[in-house]
Image (cartoon, helix red, strand yellow):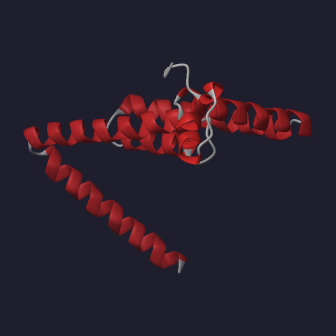
Amino acid sequence: MATWRRRTSRALRHRLRAFRARVAARPTLNLAYRIGIGVVGTVVLAIGILAIPYPGPGWAMVFAGLGILASEFAWAHHVLGWVRVRYRKAMAWYSARGLGIRVLGAVLTAAVVVATLWVLNTFGWFAGWIGVDGEWLRSPLQR
């Protein structure tokens, strides 16, 4: 099984390199390809950064966006390595802390989620659905 994976992986890499070489041989197509990679990578990265404080795949999307960008841009490759090292160090530090720090991290994360949901008027929107009316539920942006 492992040999098959290595062979398949090698064959896939070879095909991808051949595809990229064909694209690179045509300057206009190469520019369009790089712009497309730049746009897609930036969108994925931006959504990932916005999703970091929320439960879910925020950091995974950041790494995916940087990975997409790193496939075409050297600066993104360097940033990806730098962020990866910092992320591992931060997670090692966080994991080494006691239960109190981890609970505090969870509480702060929950506070960020609740605050952003309030600012985006999510509570006011759902309160209207169930017939609850409270001025405090409305976002300050809606007043």
Answer with left or right where residue 22 lies relative to residue 72.
left
Q: Relative to the observer, which residue lies in front, 70 or 130?
A: 130
Task: Identify the residue shown where x is 60% and y is 48%.
Answer: 56
Q: Position of residue 120 (x, y in %)?
A: 52, 30
Task: Identify the residue shown where x is 53% and y is 46%.
Answer: 129
Q: Report if residue 94 is visible in the image.
A: yes
Q: Position of residue 55 (x, y in %)?
A: 63, 45
Q: Position of residue 52 (x, y in %)?
A: 58, 36
Residue at the bottom extreme? 1
Answer with left or right where residue 60 lies relative to residue 41.
right
Answer with left or right where residue 55 lies relative to residue 141.
right
Q: Quadrant of residue 31?
A: top left
Q: Relative to the observer, which residue lies in front, 142 or 25?
A: 142
Is 50 drawn above or below residue 68 in the view shown?
A: above
Q: Relative to the observer, which residue lies in front, 96 or 134?
A: 134
Task: Identify the residue shown where x is 81% and y is 41%.
Answer: 95
**How many numbered marks does the figure carry?**
0
Q: Quadrant of residue 15?
A: bottom left
Task: Identify the residue shown where x is 38% and y is 44%.
Answer: 68
Q: Relative to the observer, which residue lies in front, 78 or 54?
A: 54
Q: Position of residue 113 (x, y in %)?
A: 64, 35
Q: Report if residue 98 is visible in the image.
A: no
